[in-house]
């Protein structure tokens, strides 16, 4: 069975500061990992994905994430926060190989302080 | 791509009534997924289709829930005898299986928010 743990349900950072959102996963097979962003009353938008290629993955809007197998982590970072980054962020895992249902974490709400 | 669309966007119903939601996936996406998201939680998988075949159903999908994708295009999710605990956002997603670079990427619709009073 797969699971995802997102540490910190709320994170606040100042505009221009580093954004770090934490995600740890559990999977019995090599995982596929994803970060999604959700704005209020909207669906989820894919930020980036890891599918066993490069361990450092770059996504949209300046976000990137690094897969660390030894730490079972896939933390999301952005060097400089913008006000428009305020949203809910979800980490998700799937087994891939045809079993592609996503198991999501509980989410982290990111607030940007002007 | 016009994106995944869902209708209605909002539904308010009384306990015990039946409701049906529709999802139109991105054209030529042959995989379609339903998830449920309650307040303060991440989405939870309900079921998924490859073309018209329903390949997996979650334990969350009680016998009051049924999903169809009759022609391998749009899908419907019906909830019979709604309960207050069914109040949630119901999300639909689709993914391609043939385009290698985009495999495993699920594209989500805006969701249908159900309120059961």
Image: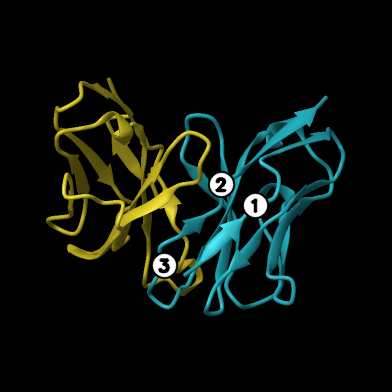
Chain colours: A cyan, B yellow
Which residue is more in the foreground, A5 or B98?
A: A5
| Residue under disc 1 on the same chain as residue under disc 2 | yes
Query: How far apart are the alpha carbons under marks 2 and 3?
Result: 19 Å
Q: Secondary structure at mark 3?
A: loop
Which comes sooner in the sequence, label 2 or label 3? 3
Which residue is more in the foreground, A27 or B103?
A: A27
Quadrant containing the C terminus of chain A in the rendered view: top right
Which chain's residue wears label 2? A
Estimate how packed mark 1 is, as few (under 14), some (14 to 19) or many (20 or more) residues with alpha carbons within 10 Å. Answer: many
Which comes sooner in the sequence, label 3 or label 1? 1
Q: Are marks 1 and 2 in contact (CB under 8 Å)?
A: yes
| Residue under disc 3 on the same chain as residue under disc 1 | yes
x, y percent for residue A40: 53, 30
Which comes sooner in the sequence, label 1 or label 2? 1
Query: How far apart are the alpha carbons under marks 3 and 1?
Result: 20 Å
Q: Is residue A16 left or right of residue B25?
A: right
Which residue is more in the foreground, A9 or B103?
A: A9
- Residue A89, above or below B17: below
Which residue is more in the foreground, B97 or B117?
A: B117
What label does residue A100 carry, if any?
Answer: 3
x, y percent for residue A69: 70, 76
Which chain's residue wears label 3? A
Residue on which the image places disc 2:
A106
Residue on which the image places disc 1:
A6
Res A93 seen here:
yes
Quarter residue B54 falls in:
bottom left
């Amino acid at each position: 069975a797969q699971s995802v743990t997102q540490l910190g349900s709320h994170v606040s950072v100042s505009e221009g500061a580093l954004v770090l959102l934490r995600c740890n996963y559990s999977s019995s097979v090599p995982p596929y990992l994803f970060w999604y962003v959700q704005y209020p009353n909207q669906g989820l938008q894919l930020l980036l994905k890891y599918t066993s290629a490069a361990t450092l993955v770059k996504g949209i809007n300046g976000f990137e994430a690094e897969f660390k197998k030894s730490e079972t982590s896939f933390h999301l970072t952005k060097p400089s926060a913008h006000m428009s980054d305020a949203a809910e962020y979800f980490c998700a895992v799937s087994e891939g190989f045809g079993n592609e249902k996503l198991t999501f974490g509980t989410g982290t709400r990111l607030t940007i302080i002007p | 791509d016009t994106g995944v669309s869902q209708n209605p966007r909002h539904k308010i119903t009384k306990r015990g009534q039946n409701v049906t939601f529709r999802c139109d996936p991105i054209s030529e996406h042959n995989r379609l997924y339903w998830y449920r998201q309650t307040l303060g939680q991440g989405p939870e998988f309900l079921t998924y289709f490859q073309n018209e075949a329903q390949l997996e159903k979650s334990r969350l999908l009680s016998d009051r829930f049924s999903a169809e994708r009759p022609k391998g295009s749009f899908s419907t999710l019906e909830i019979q005898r709604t309960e207050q605990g069914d109040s949630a956002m119901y999300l639909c997603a689709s993914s391609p299986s043939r385009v290698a670079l985009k495999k495993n990427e699920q594209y989500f619709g805006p969701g249908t928010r159900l309120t059961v009073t």
